[in-house]
Amino acid sequence: MASASTISKPGADGFRSKSLPWFQHKIGSSLTTKGRKLLEEYSGIEPSDVESHCDEALEIFPWPCIGEFWFVTLGLFSHPSYPSLLSRLRSSSPTTKFLDLGTCLGQDLRRLSFDGVSPQIFYGSDVYAEFKRVGHDLFRDEGKIQNHFIPADLLDDGVDGALIKTQGTWDVISFVMFLHIWDWDTQVRACKRILRLISRKPGSLVIGAQTGSMKPGEQALKPPFVAEGEKKSVYRQSTETFVEMWNIVEKDEVVKLRVNVEYEEHEVREKRVREEETEEKKRFFEGSEQRRLFFTVELL
């Protein structure tokens, strides 16, 4: 989920165009085993229809995570702490509240439901309200799960913002693969917002993943990520800078936190294998120094 001022609505050209380098018109080898399993067993889609069914999502939102079919990789499910999170949510009371920020098509929520978590306790939030409908179409679960979608901008300063009204009410917040779209200052601001949403009870948890780098720092964006002549950068975190950022947030928000962060194991090998599987699939967003960061932030 990102600021509406940062990402434009889908259009015939620009960043959301289907003609850009990252866009794949067919899911092909991007369909992971775990993604297929969810669509077949949770959604009830026939095995022979899964690929064409996924391709339909591209017609709605050619955003990078959709244009490269990242939504079938199930980022939260890949987190090393997913088993402990699952155990916690399965045994939680009906009053527990779980929020998936930047939920996109709600793929991680569907996996939680498939794994036995009650849909009554979880909510998803993203900038685009249309994701709710597309998610129901993709997973064929209209009426099967609760209508717990909050269309909202995390960085919205308005006092009437849908997320601001929920401050201090969430027991667990997840956010996967969106923090890295901002520069350092905006990432700090976003983390402060997230911390204000979470309950201040000890044990409240923030969990997620993002793109990081072995060489942290600001990276200037170039076309097609920005218009010609536009100057904008993103900050790529290392494990060390990620902890430093949360130390700043901890101090400013006057709380005590336990921050754990690690690089994804075997990321380089997995990337090479994916690229060798098919010549047509080029990972447009990955560089030799990039790594995925998995993290948890717990209130003490």
Image (tube, rainbow, N blue to C red):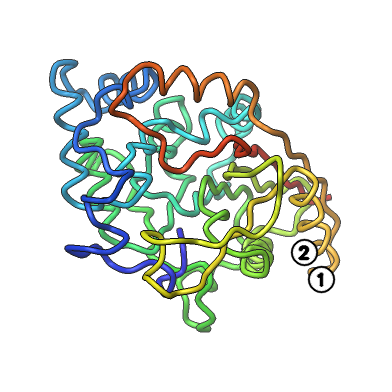
Q: CA distance from mark 2 to mark 1?
A: 5 Å
Instruction: Say what secondary structure mark 1 lies in.
Output: helix
User: Count of labels shown?
Assistant: 2
Q: In this view of the protein, which residue sits in the foreground, 287 or 145?
A: 287
Q: Is residue 221 left or right of residue 40?
A: right
Q: Residue at x 65, y 29 (%)?
A: 81
Q: In this view of the protein, which residue sits in the foreground, 1 or 87?
A: 1
Q: Residue at x 28, y 58 (%)?
A: 16
Across and down, in percent, residue 101 comes to 50, 54
Q: Quadrant of the N terminus?
A: bottom left
Q: Is residue 76 left or right of residue 216?
A: left
Q: Residues within 10 Å of mark 2 (few under 14, many from 20)?
A: many
Q: Residue at x 16, y 32 (%)?
A: 53
> Which residue bears the numbered disc 2?
249
Give the answer, above or below, for where 11 lies relative to 215: below
Q: Residue at x 77, y 64 (%)?
A: 249
Quadrant of residue 37 within the rendered picture: top left
Dot 2 and dot 1 residues touching (CB under 8 Å): yes
Q: Of the residues shown, which amino acid type is indicated by label 2?
A: Val
Mark linked to residue 190 = none
Quadrant of residue 80 within the rendered picture: top right
Quadrant of residue 234 within the rendered picture: bottom right
The residue furthest front is: 229
> Which residue bears the numbered disc 1?
252
Q: Is residue 225 left or right of residue 25?
A: right
Across and down, in percent, residue 116 comes to 46, 26
Give the answer, above or below, for where 171 lies relative to 51: below
Across and down, in percent, residue 112 comes to 46, 32
